[in-house]
Image (tube, grey):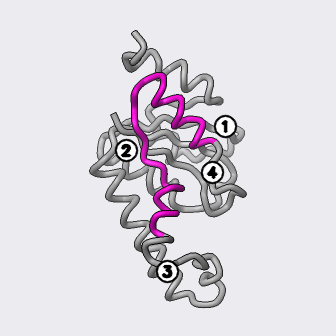
Amino acid sequence: MKVYLSGAMEFVEDEGAGWREEVTQWLDKTLGHSVYNPVMESENLVKEYSAESYRDWKKNDIQKYSDFMRKCVNRDIDIVRNETDYLICLWDDGARKGAGTHAEVTIAYECGKPVYLINKLPIDDLSGWIMACSREIFSSFKELKTFLATQFPSVNT
């Protein structure tokens, strides 16, 4: 099984690398699932297209920024549609402010892939659209892990 790790990148300090690394290790060790980590893929695209200063382009060269971001968007859409089995999403203020997480959740839903959402917002602030696209909603990673451990056979059994 391959999991897409969806969540804020643009509007969070570490681009969401911390939680993704922890979840990646747990999924591999406990369930034997691999992940698609958009933070790592973004780093690969930055290298591939010599886009180390792409964040500056947002202010200084909108067309160049948009062209690079389009490559990122196209890659992520393709991965969600064609290369992953389900999606884990961290929904917080950073995700709400951006757009990519909204799209990834919607695309996974449209493709019939389960979306497991960890909601860090008050329930009144959680979009009905995102709720509708989510198969299950959790308030913590601990709850998610307990659920996934019951859904998928463990590699340790």
Point out the tag, 2 or 1, that comes first from the N-terminus. 2
Image quarter in which the C terminus is found: top left
Point out the tag, 1 or 3, that comes first from the N-terminus. 3
- Which label sits in the foreground, 1 or 4? 4
Specify the segment rendered in magenta: 19-45
- Residue on which the image places disc 1: 123
Q: In terms of secondary structure, where does tag 1 sit? A: helix
Point out the tag, 1 or 4, that comes first from the N-terminus. 4
Q: In terms of secondary structure, where does tag 3 sit? A: helix
- Residue on which the image places disc 2: 109
Q: Marks 1/3: CA distance?
A: 33 Å
Main SS of residues in magenta: helix
Identify the mark at residue 16; answer none if there is no mark: 4
Q: Marks 1/4: CA distance?
A: 22 Å
Amino acid at dot 3: Ser
Quarter-wise, where is residue 4 in the image?
A: top left
Mark 2 in CB contact with mark 3 (< 8 angstroms): no
Quarter-wise, where is residue 8 in the image?
A: bottom right
Q: Callout 4: few (<14), some (14-19), or many (20+) C-alpha neighbours within 10 Å? A: many
Q: Callout 1: few (<14), some (14-19), or many (20+) C-alpha neighbours within 10 Å? A: few
- Which label sits in the foreground, 1 or 3? 3
Identify the mark at residue 66; answer none if there is no mark: 3
Percent position of residue 117, x then y: 53, 37
Percent position of residue 9, x then y: 60, 58
Q: In terms of secondary structure, where does tag 2 sit? A: helix
Q: Is residue 92 above or below residue 74?
A: above
Q: Residue at x 53, y 33 (%)?
A: 25
31 magenta-colored: yes
Amino acid at dot 4: Gly
Q: Marks 2/3: CA distance?
A: 26 Å
Q: Marks 4/3: CA distance?
A: 21 Å
